[in-house]
Amino acid sequence: MIQLGVILVYLGLLVGLGFLANRLFRGTASDFMLASHSIGPLLLLMSLFGTTMTAFALVGSTGRAYTLGVGVYGLLGSASGIIHSLCFFVIGVPLWRLGKRYGYTTQIQFFRDRLENDTLGLLLFPILVLLVICYLMLGVVGGGAVVSAVTAGAFESQGWFAAEGYGVPAWLASAVICGVVLTYVLFGGMRGAAWANTFQTSVFMVLGLVTFIVVANAIGGRDSFLENLQGASQAVSESQLSREKIPQPVYFSFLLIPLSVGMFPHVFQHWLTARSAEAFKLPIVLHPIFIMILWVPCVLLGVWASASTSGVPPGTPENAVLATLVKMHAGPVLGGLLTAGILAAIMSSLDSQFLCLGTMFTQDLLLRYCGNKELGDQRTVFMARLFIVVIVMITYLLSLFLPRAVFDLGLWSFTGFTGLFPLAVAALYWRRLTAAGAIASVLTVLASWLILFWRSGFGTNKRYGFPEADMNLGVPMMLPVVAITVASAVVLVVVSLLTTPPSKATLAKFFDGEGRRLV
Amino acid sequence: MKYAVWILVALLVVLHQDYWQWKNAQLDFAFLPRAITYHIFISLAAAGVWLLVIKYAWPVGSDEDPVNGSWEDVES
C-alpha cells in the first residue's frame, strides 16, 4: 500500500508540472506544439533521451536479457549509442534548419514541400499514426504491467482485485498512466512535455542506478558492493553470459532498428523545439553515454534474474521481470520510488507521442484542408487536444485486447519507421528523388510490413525472421527490418530514376546548382 | 579531418559486430561479462567519435541561413 502511495504522489507531481507549464503557455499553436523554438542544449539532451528511452529500454531490455542473456546490450544499447547520434546529426540538424527556414512543424509538411506532392502526405499520415500507436502501446502495456506486478498483494486485506493477485489491475494502472500523461500534455503542451521529460529522465536515471545497487546487494548477499556484484554474476549460467542464444545475422540486423529514430514523428518535433543548431551538439555527444548508464544496469539485472539466487520464479513473463526484482528486493518506500522511476521512463515517451499525433492531425489534415484563417490559434490547439484524447482512448482500448511482450511490440513499430528511413535520407541528400519514387517506397514499406507482420502471427512469433527457413534463398534468416528497408530503398531509387523530379524552383529551395544541400 | 572522423564512425559500426568473442562468457573484474565490458568501450568510443564529428565535421554556420543571413532575419 505504501508503494502505491509513493506512485500516486509521483503522478500528482507530474500533473502539477503540467499546470505550471500551462502558466507560461502563450496560447499559440506554435507554443503548444514547438515551445516557440526555445529549448536549449540541456533540455534538448534530456527530452530527446527521455523520448527515445521507453518501456522498451527498461522493462523490455531487462526482460529480454532474462531470456537471451548479456548480448542484449550490444544488440540495441551500444548500437543505439552510435546510430541515434548519427540520426541527430545527419537528419536532425538539417531538418531543424529547414523547419526553421520554411516553418515546418511536421515531417509531412517537409516531404510535401520537398516533393511538391499532396498524395504523399495523405499516404504517410495514416501510416505514421499507425506506427506511433504501436509504439504508444509499448508504454501503455509496459506501464500497466509494472504497476500491477509491484502492487500485487496491496489490497489483500480489503479482498479487492483477487484475480490480479490483490494488486492494481494492469488495465486500471494503464488507464491512470494515460490520464496523467494526457493531463500534463493537454495543459502544458510541448513545454510541459519537455519539462516533464527532463524531470522524468533525471528521475529514471538516478532511480535506475539505485535499483541496480539495491538489487545487487540483495542478490549477492555478501559484505561489500563489489562482492555482491561478483556473487550475482557468478551465479548466472554460462549461456546467459555469452551471446550463444543470439544468431549472428539477427545481431547484425538489429543494427538497423535504431535508424527508426530518423523517422519518429515525435523526435522530429523535439528537434524543431531546439533554440539553435548548436543545441544539438550536447545530445549528439552525450546520448551514447546516457544509454550506457541506463542499459548496462538493466541488462545486468535481467541476466541476474535468470539465476536461481535472484528469487525470480522461472518462467516469469519478460514484462514482469524488472517489477518482480524491485518488489522482492526493495522495501515498500524504495519500491514505490523505483516503480515511479520505471514509470518516468515510460511516460517521458508517451507525452511526446501524444503531442506529435495532435500536431500531425492539425497541421497535416486540418490546417492543410480547412485553412489557418478559418480555424485560428485557439481552435487549432483545441482540435489538437481533442485528437490526442481520441487517439489515446483508441490506443488504450487496443492495449486491452492485444497484449504482447513489450520488446516485440516495439520491434515491429521500429521496423516500420526504419523502413521509411531511406525516404528521409533521400529527401535531404538526393536531388533526384521524385514524388513517385517516394510514394512507391512508402507503399512498399506498408505492403511488406503488413505481410511480414501477418507471417509472424501478428507479432506472436518472437523468433520470426526473413527469409523464412523453408525459402532457401541463400541468405541467412534476419530480422524483417532488413528485407523491408532494402526493398524500400531499391524501389525508391529505381522509381525515382524512371520518373520526373520536382521543378527547378522547388529544388532550388533545398539544393544549390551542384546538387549540394543549401541548408 | 572531416573524412577521417567519418571513417571512425564507420569503424565503430564494424567494431560493434564483434563476432570473434561470441561465446566468450568470461567475467571481467569477476562480475562484468566480457560482452558488456567490450560494448561499454564501444559506447565510450562512440561519445568520443561524436565529439570529433561536432568539432571537425560540423556544418559551417549551421545556425545561419546560407542564402539570406541569420534565422532572425528570415523570421522578421
Image (cartoon, coloured by chain):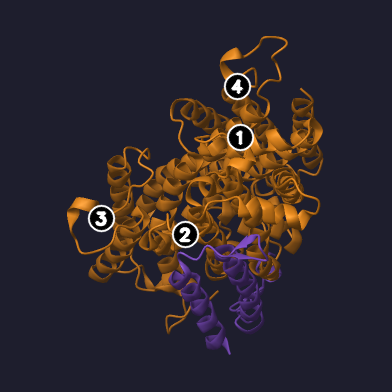
Chain colours: A orange, B purple
Both on one chain, marks 4 and 2? yes
Residue under pointer 3: A467
Q: Chain of mark 2?
A: A
Amino acid type, label 2 = Arg
Give the percent coordinates (x, y) of residue A145: 58, 31
Amino acid type, label 4 = Pro
Circle 1 — which element? helix
Can you say whether A84 is above or below A53 in the image?
below
Give the percent coordinates (x, y) of residue A205: 72, 51
User: Which mark sits nearer the N-terminus, 3 or 2?
Assistant: 2
Amino acid type, label 1 = Gly
Circle 2 — which element? loop
Whether tag 1 and tag 3 are in contact, CB under 8 A, the answer is no
The answer to whether A54 appears left or right of A414 in the picture is right
Q: Nearer the viewer, residue A163 or A97?
A: A163
Q: Nearer the viewer, residue A70 or A455?
A: A70
Label number found at residue B5? none
Q: CA distance from mark 4 to mark 3?
A: 40 Å
Residue under pointer 2: A243
Both on one chain, marks 4 and 1? yes
